[in-house]
């Protein structure tokens, strides 16, 4: 049985403290998902609700996820939108969304960067990992939406190119941010994105999430379901 009694008790106590008595509460274990539904849960409960299945990368190609589109036709693609939104000091935005100046903080490795060319915009749950975890069965439109998810602030993150390339397409079993103080946030965000998109985990990933999250606060987690 996957549910751990101690974590479940802590999660239930947290929900009782944080959710008004009159509120309609949905948890990550909601049987019938609906896009746009708001899920209120806790980190431990959300991890426990993830479906465990074997992963399969058969047929994966990065181009299966059309990314860095300009959804609002303002001249700035998804990558540039994230860089602008996450800048500590705003860059100047020129013709064709060329960025000049600005300053960014890379939470993966605690670096301050002053050149947009030194940053990557990372899919926190990598595209290949999403494919392994269910996206192989999605439509091309759903994969495009995942790859350009500006509606979920946790989905895309501006980080140093060095840290992003070290991570590559690894999941939490094989890679964690070098900045140890950020790891609980990373685990919570990873879990939130998997919950939002209905993605699965393999057994090693589930075991890693349980083990690592045991050292993190069982904080409330709110997710808007994408599908």
Image (tube, rainbow, N blue to C red):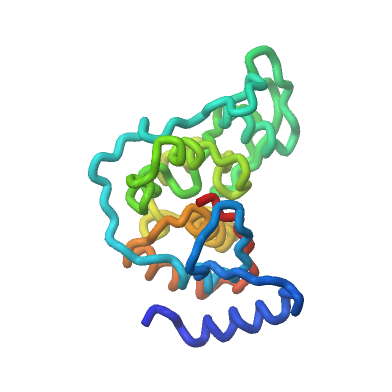
Residue shown at 62% from the left, 43% from the top: 151
Q: Is residue 158 visible?
A: yes
Q: Is residue 31 above or below residue 87?
A: below
Residue shown at 60% from the left, 69% from the top: 26
Q: Position of residue 85 (x, y in %)?
A: 69, 36
- Horizontal side of 20 relative to 79 (left or right) equals right
Q: Position of residue 224 (x, y in %)?
A: 61, 55
Q: Nearer the viewer, residue 106 or 45?
A: 45
Task: Spot the residue most to the top.
Answer: 95
- Horizontal side of 41 relative to 4 (left or right) equals right
Q: Quadrant of the N terminus?
A: bottom left
Q: Is residue 177 visible?
A: no
Residue shown at 52% from the left, 34% from the top: 120
Q: Position of residue 106 (x, y in %)?
A: 60, 43
Residue shown at 39% from the left, 40% from the top: 139
Q: Is residue 83 above or below residue 155?
A: above
Task: Spot the residue most to the left.
Answer: 58
- Horizontal side of 58 relative to 7 (left or right) equals left
Q: Position of residue 8 (x, y in %)?
A: 53, 82
Image mark count: 0
């Amino acid at each position: 049985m996957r549910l751990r009694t101690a974590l479940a008790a802590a999660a239930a106590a947290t929900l009782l403290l944080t959710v008004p008595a009159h509120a309609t509460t949905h948890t990550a274990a909601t049987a019938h998902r609906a896009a746009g539904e708001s899920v209120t849960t806790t980190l431990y409960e959300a991890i426990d609700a993830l479906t465990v299945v074997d992963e399969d990368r058969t047929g994966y190609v990065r181009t299966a996820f059309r990314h860095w589109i300009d959804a609002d036709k303002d001249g700035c693609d998804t990558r540039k939108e994230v860089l602008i939104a996450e800048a500590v000091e705003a860059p100047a935005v020129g013709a064709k969304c060329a960025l000049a100046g600005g300053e960014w903080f890379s939470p993966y490795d605690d670096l301050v960067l002053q050149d947009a060319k030194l940053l990557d915009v990372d899919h926190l749950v990598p595209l290949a990992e999403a494919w392994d975890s269910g996206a192989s069965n999605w439509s091309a439109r759903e994969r495009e939406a995942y790859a350009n998810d500006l509606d979920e602030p946790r989905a895309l993150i501006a980080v140093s190119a060095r840290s992003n390339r070290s991570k590559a397409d690894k999941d939490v079993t094989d890679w964690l941010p070098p900045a140890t103080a950020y790891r609980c946030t990373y685990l919570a965000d990873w879990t939130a994105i998997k919950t939002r998109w209905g993605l699965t985990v393999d057994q090693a990933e589930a075991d890693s999430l349980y083990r690592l999250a045991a050292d993190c606060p069982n904080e409330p987690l709110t997710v808007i379901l994408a599908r």
